[in-house]
Amino acid sequence: MQDIDNEMKKPLLKHLVEITAHREHSRLALSVISALYQLTNVQEIRMLDIFNMRDTHYVQEKMVIRDGEVHTIDEHTSDDPKEPLSSYPAMVACIRSHLNEYLETAEDGTHILWLPVWLHGKMNSCVEIRSTKPFDAQMLDVIHGIFHVYCNYQSLLDYSERDALTGLFNRKTFDEQFTKYAFAIAPHEAHSLEKNDRRHDGLAEAKGHWLAVVDIDHFKQVNDRYGHLYGDEVLILMANILRASFRSHDRIFRFGGEEFVILLRSTTLSDARKIFDRFRQNVQEYDFPQVGKVTVSLGFVGISRETPVVILGHADQSLYHAKKNGRNRICFYEELVDSGVLHSGITTNDTVEFF
């Protein structure tokens, strides 16, 4: 970036300092597109996310700067606008050829620069920059410099948030994110745990958010019989099954050992039950190398206005019940409370792990 004039160096350094001060992906992305917009004076910049749902790839606008105004999409909104990836030929071309950028001119004469964001060998998002004027060499130097800093820094953040073995989010990330996740839910979406508010007929039709705790059945026997290398392979393959069984905007965490946590968002109780049970069946039907058949037990609860420790404790109680009553099954906390099997509140059984 040696061609950049002295007038631009000071604001450029200021933006780089601001970018590297963030520890959260959304704030980082907003800081980056704001820097690009202010330093290049382009027409519009969008950050687009790519996700998979029911074996189809979609594109969703995460944030946009247009006419000097910033618009962001709330990640907890259930009706996020999305389009099929096929509607974006430039992004499809980037994926097919693993391109680092794609430059095109639209029919109306607008110049468009596409900058894919690659993570773990996959394109998980893309920056779209629109300009009424062609991108000159100095402008491209600024764009490339800031964008490469963003990609490198995002990789560092992602590395700190992930479990080294499975690549899933780690317990530290759950502890940091779950309070924000739970209390970002709109009041009408929260599932009240008060007895007189629990009307399951209505609850089954309303979309809500759910937390599940998963435990691999008899995992100690796998390690004892086949060794920890095969045990690790089971954990890696279990992570792959988890990714394939849930949507990309759901959240999957490895808590350590053979325990996993799932945040399932914006779905009905009946669908949540089907999704969790489909995952259980996917595991049951999978042939693990050398080990053979493995099963899981799962307990889940509606995410309410309770504290994270209470919500997690309730899910853990329902998991404990599933493991005590045959394993390879799923249990719903509120259903167990209504039937009198469990009493509302956190018990002190050995499985509950507090923050």
Image (cartoon, rainbow, N blue to C red):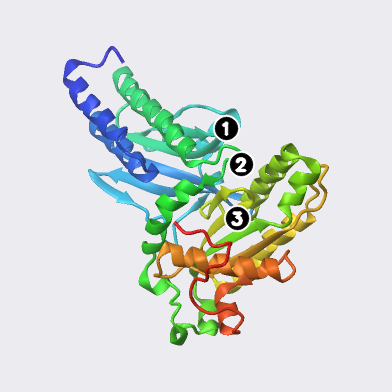
Secondary structure, mark 3, is loop
- Label 3: how many residues lie within 10 Å, few (<14), some (14-19) or many (20+)? many
Q: Residue visible at 57% across and 32% down?
A: 121
Q: Residue furthest bottom?
A: 196
In contact (CB < 8 Å): disc 2 and disc 3: no
Q: CA distance from mark 1 to mark 3?
A: 20 Å
Three-letter residue code for mark 2: Thr
In contact (CB < 8 Å): disc 1 and disc 3: no
Q: Is residue 283 above or below residue 269?
A: above
Q: CA distance from mark 2 to mark 3?
A: 16 Å
Residue 246 numbered mark, or none: 3
Secondary structure, mark 2, is loop
At which x and y percent is residue 200?
Answer: 54, 82
Query: Which residue is denoted by mark 1 in the rendering?
Result: 121
Three-letter residue code for mark 3: Phe
Q: Residue furthest top?
A: 2
